[in-house]
Amino acid sequence: MKVKSILFSFFFSSFFCFVISFPFSVLSRPGRVIHIADADTITVLKDHKQIPISLYGIDAPDKGQPFGSGAKDFTLDMAKMKRVEVVPIAVDSNGRTVASVYIEGDGENLAEELVQAGYARVYLDCKRRICGFWLKLESRA
């Protein structure tokens, strides 16, 4: 009876660890930035599929708006044709994946870099822990 209890605990613990870690490996998608529509909207190519991405938690000016060109140029310099890690969070009403995007190699968060450079604002309804830090960066930019 004790052996069954120990085996059950072992298998339950192993299964629980698998379930907890599984979503992170599935959600994290490496790819290459192939298009930048504006500073906070990019397209990533992964497995021969183009994935439109809206950067999580921020709003940057669109082209035609003040600072729109500078913001887009900043994103071009940071990400164009670079490998990135995409961590999906949601899908927006336009069908784009809302995600955190990290530049491969240095691990910089693209949204955070835009905020720090003064090219983006943090959405007030940004719910993740990192948003508080971004708001501090925004106030300094």
Image (spheres, rainbow, N blue to C red):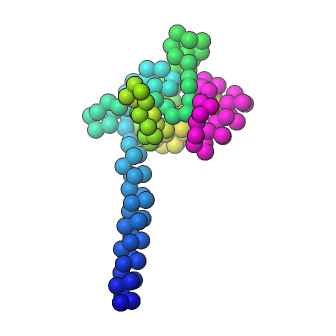
Query: Where residue 47 appears, x then y in whole percent?
Result: 28, 38
Q: Residue at x 46, y 25 (%)?
A: 41
Assess whether residue 27 is covered by the magenta stretch.
Answer: no
Q: Residue at x 56, y 18 (%)?
A: 61
Kindly give the residue lying farthest to the bottom in the view shown. Answer: 1
Q: Residue at x 67, y 34 (%)?
A: 135
Judge from the rendering whether residue 139 lies leftward or rightward of residue 37; answer left or right: right
Kindly give the residue lying farthest to the right in the view shown. Answer: 140
Query: Where residue 12 appears, x then y in whole percent?
Result: 38, 72
Q: Is residue 43 visible?
A: no
> Quadrant of the image for the N terminus?
bottom left
Kindly give the residue lying farthest to the top in the view shown. Answer: 64
Query: Where residue 89 appears, x then y in whole percent?
Result: 46, 40
Judge from the rendering whether residue 27 lies leftward or rightward of residue 106; answer left or right: left
Where does the magenta region start and end? 118-141
Q: Residue at x 36, y 49 (%)?
A: 26
Of residue 38 and residue 124, the one placed in the foreground of this image is 124
Assess whether residue 132 is covered by the magenta stretch.
Answer: yes
Kindly give the residue lying farthest to the left in the view shown. Answer: 48
Of residue 72 and residue 20, the one placed in the foreground of this image is 20
Quadrant location of residue 87? top left
Query: Where residue 128 appears, x then y in whole percent?
Result: 57, 42
> Quadrant of the image for the C terminus?
top right
